[in-house]
Structures are given as C-alpha cells and as structure tokens.
Image (cartoon, rainbow, N blue to C red):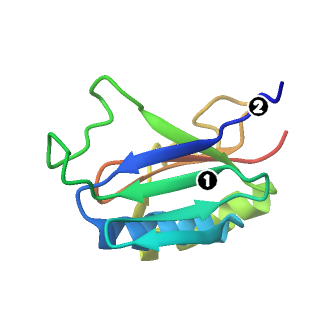
Amino acid sequence: MVAAVHHVEIWVPDLSRAVASWGWVLSRLGWKDGDGWPGGMTWIASDGSYVVVEQSPAMSAAEHDRMRPGMNHLALNAASRAEVDTVVGEAADHGWTLMFADRHPYAGGPQHYAAFLHNTDGYELEIVAPD
C-alpha cells in the first residue's frame, strides 16, 4: 500500500484570486498546470497528487476561516532552504503574506525551516525545507 495524498480540493470564494495566488505558489514549487474548467483549476505534482481550487455554487459561506473546524493549513515541500527563501521574497507580489515574521524561518521550531504564508482569502500555506 502506498501512503500518499491523492488530491486536496480547496473551495474558494473567488476563482480568479485563487488561480493567481495558489497557481503562482504551486507552479513556483514545480507543480504543473492540470485541467481547468469554468469553476476550477488543478495543479499536479511530480508524484501524481494534485491540488484543486474550485469556486463551487454549493458553498455554504462566502469566506474561509482557518480557525474554524476543518483544515487549518496545507504544508508543501520545497526543494531547499533557498527555495523557501525565494518563495518568501516573491510571495507579496502574488497575494501571500508572511506570518510569524518575528520567528521566520523557525516559527515551527528550531529544527523546522519553513515559511508560513496566508493569502488574501485567509488560507494558510506552509512551505517546508528538507531536513
């Protein structure tokens, strides 16, 4: 049995903002554009797992709150510490803001080199460098 994530689907309040912010960071980390349709878009990792952003008409709220029950954040691997740093340096131009700036890049602990970002719609993303 393979222990891996098949896909993650994120419902978003504004598809164009999601494609701009999620699309940039996923592409920056090496994910490839997948299928798109009027209500959504996918990006595919080298292992075949994928992330979907969708503006579904079935959403029960107009905004995301990571502090409510549900997923708090998504954590993705970077290739290196340098890649984490580069993403952080470019993030603001693509709708992402660095969280915990006073503790960056060790906000997750002294052995955990990562960036914690959030976007305009309130989604949190952690970019993790290899040990």
Q: What amino acid is at disc 1?
A: Tyr
Residue 72 quadrant: top left
Q: Amino acid at mark 2?
A: Gln
Image-based side of 36 in relation to 107, left or right? left
Locate residue 12, reporting x and y percent: 30, 54
Whether residue 107 is visible: yes
In this rendering, the answer to whether 51 lies above or below 7 is: below
- Position of the N terminus, as image quadrant, is top right
Label total for image? 2
Is 131 displayed left or right of 31 in the figure? Answer: right
In the image, residue 107 lies at what x, y percent? 57, 36
Query: Hey, which quadrant is residue 93 in on the image?
Result: bottom left
In this view, 34 is above or below 13: below
- Residue 47 picture location, percent across and down: 79, 52
Q: Which residue is mark 2?
A: 111
SS type, badge 1: strand
Earlier residue among tags 2 and 1 = 1
At 28% from the left edge and 58% from the top edge, which residue is drawn? 55
Quarter of the image with the C terminus in it = top right
* Snapshot quadrant of residue 37: bottom left
Report which residue position mark 1 lands on: 50
Q: Helix, strand, or loop for circle 2? A: loop
Q: Nearer the viewer, residue 42 or 86?
A: 42
